[in-house]
């Protein structure tokens, strides 16, 4: 555990202050929401634009787990009401406000896995036809955020899922934080 906190302090080069301060709020298992590193507490996710971003993609057996749309919605429903892959506007804001790398730095400093580049992720948003959904991919050369309209009924479209909870719709007081898990 000691190496974890030393790595966080090194990552943010903040030895002059008594505690590390992040650019975004972090939710801890104990219900603490703060921009500070809370030693000896387990972080659950990073809050950006009033949405909680999980520290990890959905995994199975510790490995990245690619899901089709049916599996994605079942997983989210089984794990937590209000959890999905984040709306398209949410990911637009993260990219347009140049916060992608900063969010990844905080996720990594907290011991999580950064959002992958050049990998396709499901959003939590299907289109009006209710037969397709948005998927996104962040490419680095050139730096662009790409979207794809993906058929929902396809059993062959397997993408990653980074769980997101919209705290405007599902405020923290509506669910027991201590029971919050993102992987079933």
Image: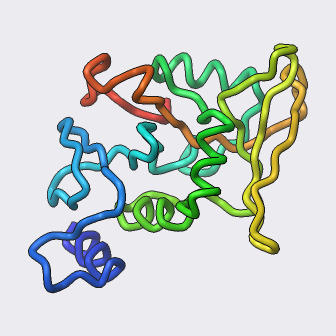
Residue 85 screen position, x and y as percent: 61, 35
- Quick check: 78 left or right of 13? right
Q: Name the one closer to the observer, 166 or 39.
A: 166
* Residue drawn 48% across the image and 23% down it: 79
Residue 177 screen position, x and y as percent: 27, 29
- Quick check: 93 left or right of 38? right
Does 166 sit above or below residue 173? below
Does 69 sit above or below residue 158? above
* Residue drawn 71% across the image and 37% down it: 122
* Residue drawn 18% across the image and 42% down it: 32
* Residue drawn 63% across the image and 18% down it: 74
Residue 61 in view: yes
Residue 68 screen position, x and y as percent: 78, 30
Q: Name the one closer to the observer, 128 or 131.
A: 128
Does 103 sit above or below residue 61? below
> What is the quadrant of residue 154 in the picture?
top right
- Quick check: 115 left or right of 138? left
Does 64 sit above or below residue 11? above
Residue 83 screen position, x and y as percent: 51, 26
| Image quarter hosting the N terminus | bottom left
> What is the quadrant of residue 8 in the picture?
bottom left
Q: How many labels does the image show?
A: 0
- Quick check: 43 left or right of 81? left
Residue 60 in view: no
Q: Name the one closer to the observer, 149 or 50.
A: 50
Q: Which colour scheme is used?
A: rainbow
Q: Residue placed farthest to the front in the image?
A: 97
């Amino acid at each position: 555990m000691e190496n974890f906190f030393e790595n966080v302090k090194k990552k943010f080069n903040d030895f002059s202050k008594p505690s590390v301060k992040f650019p975004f709020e972090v939710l801890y298992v104990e219900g603490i929401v703060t921009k500070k590193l809370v030693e000896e507490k387990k972080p659950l996710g990073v809050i950006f634009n009033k949405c909680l971003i999980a520290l990890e993609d959905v995994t199975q057996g510790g490995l990245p787990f690619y899901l089709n749309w049916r599996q994605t919605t079942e997983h989210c429903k089984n794990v937590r009401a209000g959890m999905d892959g984040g709306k398209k506007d949410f990911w637009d804001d993260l990219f347009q406000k140049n916060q992608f790398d900063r969010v990844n730095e905080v996720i990594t400093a907290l011991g999580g896995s950064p959002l992958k580049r050049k990998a396709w992720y499901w959003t939590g948003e299907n289109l009006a036809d209710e037969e397709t959904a948005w998927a996104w991919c962040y490419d680095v050369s050139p730096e662009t955020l790409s979207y794809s309209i993906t058929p929902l009924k396809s059993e062959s479209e397997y993408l990653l899922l980074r769980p997101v909870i919209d705290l405007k719709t599902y405020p923290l007081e509506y669910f027991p934080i201590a029971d919050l898990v993102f992987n079933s």
